[in-house]
Amino acid sequence: MLQAVILVVAQTLVMLAVSPFIVGLIRKVKAWLQCRRGASVFQPYADLAKMFRKQPVVSTTTSWIFTATPYILFASTLAAGLLVPVFASRTPLNFAGNIIALVYLLALGTFFLILAGLDAGSAFGGMGSSREAIVASLTEPAMILSIFAIALTAGSTNLSTIVHKTALLEGIVTDPSPHLMALAALFIVTIAETGRVPVDNPATHLELTMIHEAMILEYSGRYLALVEWAAGLKLLVFFTLITNVFAPWGIATTLEPGALSLGLVAYLVKVSALAVVIGFIESMFAKLRLFRVTDLLGVAFILALLGLVFFYVLRG
Amino acid sequence: MSLLSPQIGSQMVDLGSALLLLTCFAIVAQRRLSACVDLFALQSVFLALTAALVAFLTGIYHIYAAAALTVVIKVVVIPRILKQVIERLNVTRELVMNVNVPAGLLICGALVMLAFFITQPIIPLGFLLTRDSLAIALAIVLIGFFTMIARKKAVTQVIGFLVMENGLFLAATAAAYGMPLIVELGVFFDVLVGALIIGIYTHRLQDAFDSVDTTKLTILKE
């Protein structure tokens, strides 16, 4: 029991501590590729600390939704993060929800953020919310299908079971084709859901292009800090999902201290590698026109569907 | 005979075929002509790798020759011809299609299911290690065919034709460990000449209509 509590606390702390670092690392990689020196990778921590100290300004036209949303968003994203195995393949909270709960915890945060974008009544907020709703409704089927393809290969929708079986390479279907298709689909979903470059640009406040930034334009002070931190957490949850579902090797399958620390190191290395990849992608591709985003997400949906179909066809 | 166990070998062949199918979908979703050509070249690389893998697993050496020919003709020569054609044209991307991209992707998804459904009764009868790839090969042929129908520009229609040919090659490899080398040679020669002729035809189309939109060919008068 005590061990489980310690593990939950440790996982919470790791998720909270690593997420700003990932955001900073992606910025640093982008800066290097643009031949700039760039801010330190620890800059997002300083930003968060600064914003928590500032006084928030809230418009008098907003309702309770505007002030409640940062807390709901932060809590639901953190809860989603606790369902994913991070450095130990068996998360103590795995009884609390499976992969479907994870998807809808993230969707809950997105839903409230969309409402908050509309709440302040500014034109940009509404525009951002409408765009976010388009992207979210198109990514959800692709995400669910790709996750189902993986769940089928492991015979369970419980993330801990999937990761545990894949890490030990036992009791799963090892055919690489469904995994490949699901990985490609989930990667596109990650880019779209976390507002990365071909879909959204996290570094812009240009009215024509922003999606996520438009929704949170009205936030300031500690509210903004929570929203930004939640965005970093969401990025980390998706990275964790990709690395630990598709390449869980190194993760601790037992609860010995040695295995756990090795799992933590492996996790940090894998997540950082993925952040570097995302940084490269953000530098190599131009942002898509909004109406072309449907093409990209259509590809993700079809890939996930093919992953499912391959599972049934290629088993023979 | 081979170093890999048959099950892993079979899965690797499946993976190669799956990568071929993946590039098919990328071609369907891609609007830029030169990127379509690059994707076709990438698909041919995957095809050559899959064929070489089959040759390695089965010890049938003439498949190596076919794989080498694939690299020379479909990865180097034909993409270069198509790139030259594109360079001469003043179009870089295809904006209007007969079927838009998301609908096209859904149709292609349905085509894949159709191909899997059709081949389902046949596949368990096979005894070759490549038998599962037959379903994917048929799907690639259908998607190539669909690309030829859905696109209006001559260049992308050629790519659809070449994708179909890649699918047929994979089907031959999957169903019978490849055709006899002499047939293979004839097919490669046909494809090369076909690509050359269509290249010249595209130039003529451009000269006559100031466009490579093949739908203009149905217009009788100016």
Image (cartoon, coloured by chain):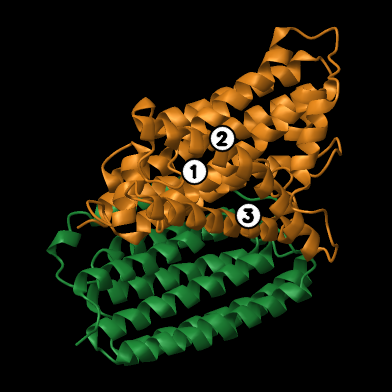
Chain colours: A orange, B green
- Amino acid at the residue labelled 2: Leu
Using the image as rendered, state which of residue A183 and residue A81 is in the foreground: A81
Using the image as rendered, state which of residue A284 and residue A202 is in the foreground: A202
Residue matched to label 1 = A301
Q: Position of residue A113 (x, y in %)?
A: 67, 23
State if disc 2 and disc 1 touch (CB < 8 Å): yes
Q: Dot 1 lies on which element?
A: helix
Q: Position of residue B121 (x, y in %)?
A: 17, 55
Q: Of the numbered discs in the image, which one, if any, rests on residue A275?
A: 3
- Discs 1 and 2 share one subunit: yes
- Amino acid at the residue labelled 1: Phe
Q: Is residue B80 shown above or below B135? A: below
Q: Of the numbered discs in the image, which one, if any, rests on residue A138?
A: 2
- Discs 3 and 1 share one subunit: yes
Q: Is any part of residue B11 visible from this angle?
A: yes
Q: Residue at x 85, y 38 (%)?
A: A205
The Cα atoms of the two marked residues, 3 and 2, are separated by 24 Å
Using the image as rendered, state which of residue B148 and residue A299 is in the foreground: A299
- Discs 3 and 2 share one subunit: yes
